[in-house]
């Protein structure tokens, strides 16, 4: 399925509209959402039982919950530090701070496969794409090749995307 068809409008308008929405959902909302997942006995076990890094993203595309191995893709950050961030902010994408609205809102983000997969998941469609993410790591620029899979998830009446991230950089070299 074409990701564009899964979105409620052109990618540009979806990005712009979501940027205008509450960019920084109050941390108490994020903690409430996280608590809802933590109350599920197997949620943390399932998140940590896969080789992929897993992120649970809310409607504002902010991380509500993550697998422990997600920190391997977020150098120098702790679990507490990535909660509330968007994926590009957590992973150190060089474009995440191009706009005041953060990850997913710059001109470069309009072509970002990860943004498209996340938005498709929030629109109720499961999608997978490859993405190239350029980031600063230890003061050096590096490019990661990622395979991202977004799966729609509704929990406690709210929409989320479960984002599975595989680092396939070694496969593409």
Image (cartoon, grey):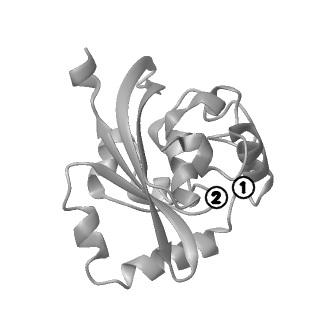
Mark 2 vs 1: CB contact within 8 A = yes
Q: Nearer the viewer, mark 2 or mark 1?
A: 2
Residue placed at 31% from the left, 74% from the top? 43
Residue placed at 77% from the left, 58% from the top? 21
Residue most extreme to the top: 173
Q: Nearer the viewer, residue 168 or 95?
A: 168
Left or right of 122 on screen, residue 141: left
Q: Position of residue 10 (x, y in %)?
A: 72, 41
Let me know if residue 92 appears in the view: yes
Quarter in which the C terminus is drawn: top left
Looking at the image, residue 92 lies above or below residue 49: above
Sequence order check, earlier mark of 2 and 1:
1
Let me know if residue 101 appears in the view: no
Left or right of 77 on screen, residue 104: right
Residue placed at 46% from the left, 68% from the top? 153
Mark 2, secondary structure of its residue: loop
Mark 2: give few (<14), some (14-19) or many (20+) Cα within 10 Å. Answer: many
Q: Position of residue 128 (x, y in %)?
A: 40, 43
Left or right of 144 on screen, residue 22: right
Number of the label disc, if any, that sits on residue 60: 2
Number of the label disc, if any, that sits on residue 111: none
How far apart are labels 2 and 1 at the CA level? Answer: 6 Å
Mark 1, secondary structure of its residue: loop
Residue placed at 20% from the left, 56% from the top? 50
Mark 1: give few (<14), some (14-19) or many (20+) Cα within 10 Å. Answer: some
Looking at the image, residue 131 lies above or below residue 165: above
Looking at the image, residue 32 lies above or below residue 25: below
Q: What residue would you read off at disc 1?
A: 23
């Amino acid at each position: 399925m074409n990701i564009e068809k899964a979105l409620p409008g052109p990618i540009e308008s979806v990005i712009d509209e979501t940027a205008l929405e509450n960019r920084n959902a109050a941390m108490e909302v994020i903690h409430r959402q996280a608590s809802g997942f933590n109350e599920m006995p197997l949620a943390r076990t399932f998140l940590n039982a896969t080789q992929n890094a897993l992120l649970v993203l809310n409607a504002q595309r902010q991380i509500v919950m993550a697998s422990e191995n997600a920190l391997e893709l977020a150098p120098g950050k702790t679990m507490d530090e990535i909660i509330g961030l968007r994926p590009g902010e957590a992973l150190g994408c060089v474009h995440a701070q191009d706009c005041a609205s953060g990850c997913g809102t710059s001109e470069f983000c309009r072509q970002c496969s990860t943004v498209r997969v996340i938005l498709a998941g929030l629109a109720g469609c499961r999608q997978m794409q490859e993405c190239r993410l350029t980031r600063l790591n230890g003061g050096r620029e590096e490019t990661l090749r990622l395979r991202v899979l977004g799966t729609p998830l509704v929990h406690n009446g709210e929409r989320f995307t479960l984002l599975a991230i595989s680092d396939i950089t070694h496969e593409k070299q």
